[in-house]
Image (cartoon, grey):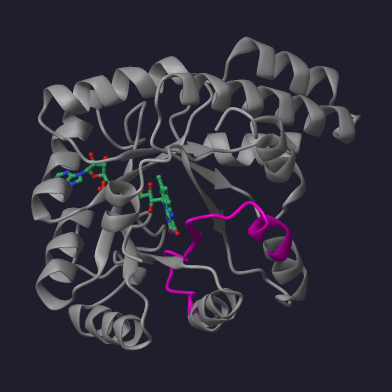
């Protein structure tokens, strides 16, 4: 089913979805984790795509997930790609019967020669996809502003370019302070952006992961998270359990505030996401 239909035909909010990434080694472990997550009836699973074009395994994995009876949303980056190769990849995706795509620019490669200048921003990719395919298009949104943008408002004006080019749904970057999400959606509505805004939830599963994910993004880390990350520096189980409790509270508050979708960045592990979904079961 298309993203557009998922969020407009279905009013049983919040709708649940998961993000996974292609593993470096074999896929078996990930497939086992996905089988656990399937019990929570996700609307779809999205699969990340390497900005450097390291996506060869992605297509195979997308088909494995679909064969488990789960709808998929492939992520698709363009900063290192020519129009010709983007077109070829799009044809392959659509021919296979996939109906959706998450259109991204991708991070600017550190090595200038890896960059291609056919697409400079995601809005150009969205327009291209809209022109060439019937795929339903998701785009990224940043509740605290994208890391390269001078401020939230200019980033939102750039988001509007993606919306005007044909995006159907906005998926946010992770955030730990729900107020940032509410403020963001309020500004989007004021600016006339009325698409579904799906909250990106990342359960904290380790100190390394927290540091890595937040170093790449503009994300406020509440004091309580820093305190617990310090306190449980040598106690990964307690930190993981704190992460489950924190994300559970976050989700409960988002549900109370009528969020349309919760998109879990699972980091290829089902445990924390499954616990959070068990915790919010009666409420959603
Ligand atoms: P854009 O929307 O193009 O924005 C990039 C920057 O340029 C922003 O600062 C924006 O304000 C500015 N800008 C946008 N349009 C214009 C314009 N027309 N003129 C001037 N400035 C402009 N990365 C991956 O490599 N693989 C993935 O699978 C992946 N999945 C993601 C999933 C989600 C839900 C999110 C939130 C991010 C994901 N990313 C992924 C990260 C993403 O690729 C980076 O954040 C990247 O730096 C920006 O991508 P974008 O599509 O948001 O770019």
Residue 104, quarter of the rendered image = bottom left
Q: Residue at x 29, y 51 (%)?
A: 9
The picture places residue 202, in percent across and down from the top left corner, at: 59, 38
Which residue does the image show at 53% across and 76% down from the upper left? Answer: 66
Would you place residue 29 above or below residue 187 in this image? below
Q: How many marks?
A: 0
Instruction: Give the quarter of the figure containing the N terminus.
Output: bottom left
Q: 37 or 212, which is in the foreground?
A: 37
What's drawn in magenta, residue-wise?
Answer: 35-55
Main secondary structure found in the magenta portion: loop
| Residue 78 in the image, given as x and y percentages of width and height | 29, 67
Viewer-side residue, 75 vs 122: 75
Q: Residue at x 33, y 67 (%)?
A: 100
Q: Is residue 226 magenta?
A: no
Q: Is residue 192 left or right of residue 198?
A: left
Residue 219: percent from left, percent from top = 47, 27
Q: Is residue 39 magenta?
A: yes
In the image, residue 9 sits, relative to residue 141, either above or below, namely below
């Amino acid at each position: 089913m298309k993203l557009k239909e998922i969020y407009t035909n279905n009013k049983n909010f919040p709708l649940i979805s998961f993000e996974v990434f292609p593993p470096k080694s074999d896929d078996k472990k990930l497939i086992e984790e996905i089988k656990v997550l399937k019990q929570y009836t996700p609307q779809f699973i999205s699969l990340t795509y390497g900005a450097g074009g390291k996506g060869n395994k992605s297509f195979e994995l997308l088909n494995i997930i679909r064969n488990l009876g789960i709808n998929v949303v492939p992520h698709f980056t363009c900063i290192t790609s020519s129009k010709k190769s983007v077109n070829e990849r799009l044809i392959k995706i659509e021919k296979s019967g996939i109906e959706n795509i998450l259109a991204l620019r991708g991070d600017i490669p550190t090595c200038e020669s890896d960059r291609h200048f056919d697409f400079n921003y995601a809005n150009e990719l969205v327009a291209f996809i809209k022109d060439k395919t019937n795929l339903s298009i998701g785009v990224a949104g940043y509740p605290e502003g994208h890391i390269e943008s001078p401020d939230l408002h200019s980033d939102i004006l750039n988001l509007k370019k993606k919306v005007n080019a044909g995006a159907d749904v906005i998926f946010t970057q992770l955030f730990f302070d729900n107020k940032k999400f509410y403020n963001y959606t309020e500004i989007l509505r004021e600016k006339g952006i009325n698409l579904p805004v799906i909250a990106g939830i990342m359960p904290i599963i380790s100190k390394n992961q927290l540091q890595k994910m937040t170093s790449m993004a503009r994300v406020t880390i509440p004091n309580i998270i820093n305190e617990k990350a310090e306190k449980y520096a040598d106690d990964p189980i307690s930190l993981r359990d704190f992460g489950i409790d924190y994300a559970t509270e976050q989700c409960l508050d988002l549900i109370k505030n009528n969020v349309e979708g919760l998109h879990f960045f699972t980091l290829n592990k089902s445990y924390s996401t499954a616990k959070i979904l068990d915790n919010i079961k009666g409420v959603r």
